[in-house]
Image (cartoon, rainbow, N blue to C red):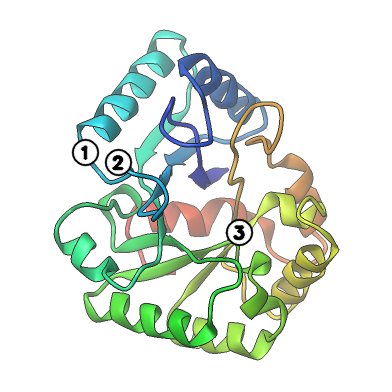
Amino acid sequence: MVDIHCHILPGFDDGAGDIQDTLEMASLAQASGTKVIVATPHCNVPSEPDNYYSSRYRDAFYSACKALEEERIPIKLLPGMEVFATYDLPELIKDNKVLTINQSNYLLMEFAFDEDPEFVEIMVDRVKEISIKPVIAHPERYEFIKNDLEFARLLVEKGCIFQANKGSLLGRYGRRSEETVYKLLKRNLISLVASDAHSAEVRTPDMRRARAAAKEFCDVKKLFEDNPLKICTNQPL
């Protein structure tokens, strides 16, 4: 499997606290069938300073890669970020302050859970204007999706790619998010599933149970392997 949303970098956000946490997460991911992980710490979160692309990110990323190699954990780590959408996001992308997924044209974006749908649509259009393809993280958790599945369809028709969280398939974010993710799956609006992992104990990178749960509703190879790999290699879905 290929996991494009994982908070595995040590000491960067509310994910792995140190390199030992990183190694434990990577070991669990590898044991559960994941071969590639995109390291996606939170970025552009207004309340969190120093969360842009910088030497801090580079140091954390390369120390993680080195540790995986030294411990002989066969996980390929790729660069990326989970970027909070603010109006100046296109300028931040142009200024190389945020990272796309493995230097592709795909950007992992998140919104406030109670965001105004009008703002969401504006930001999708603004990002697309600079030839960036928005990958919307965990759409099933947003009120503007839970309350309006037709708005979800509109975003997909505009070119958005929906990434569901594995925890949503298992009811980890509440009943409404669980119901919403399966409605989106049945309508073919979800393009891929990722872990959004934060540790090896809670919100882990193990996606086996989610894959089994989704098998009845969709092509799990496409959602857990093919589509995320295409995103990582900058191919069209």
Kindly identify the amino acid type of the residue bearing the numbered disc 3: Leu
Task: Pick whichever, 26 or 142, lies toward us.
Answer: 142
Q: CA–CA distance between discs 2 and 3?
A: 33 Å
Lower position in the chain sequence, tag 1 or tag 3: 1
Residue 188, can we see it?
A: no
Instruction: Tell me the number on the disc at residue 19.
Output: none
SS type, badge 1: loop
Task: Please give the name of the residue rendered at 33% of the width and 16% of the height, measured from the top-left corner.
Answer: 66
Residue at the disc numbered 1: 54
Residue at the disc numbered 2: 50
Please tell me how crowded label 1 is: few (under 14), some (14-19), or many (20+) other residues with Cα within 10 Å: few
Residue 134: image x %, image y %?
40, 69
Residue 12: image x %, image y %?
41, 32
Examine the rendered structure and indicate whether residue 140 appears above or below residue 82: below
Identity of the residue furthest to the left in this view: 95
Kindly identify the amino acid type of the residue bearing the numbered disc 2: Asp
Instruction: Tell me the number on the disc at residue 223.
Output: 3
- Whether pointer 1 and pointer 2 mark residues with C-beta atoms closer than 8 Å, the reply is yes
Task: Pick whichever, 208 or 134, lies toward us.
Answer: 134
Please tell me how crowded label 3 is: few (under 14), some (14-19), or many (20+) other residues with Cα within 10 Å: many
Residue 190: image x %, image y %?
61, 70
Please tell me how crowded label 2 is: few (under 14), some (14-19), or many (20+) other residues with Cα within 10 Å: some
Task: Please give the name of the residue rendered at 64% of the width and 90% of the height, measured from the top-left corner.
Answer: 150
Residue 157, can we see it?
A: yes
Decide if residue 1 is on the left or right side of residue 124: right
Kindly identify the amino acid type of the residue bearing the numbered disc 1: Ser
Task: Please give the name of the residue rendered at 24% of the width and 81% of the height, measured from the top-left corner.
Answer: 129
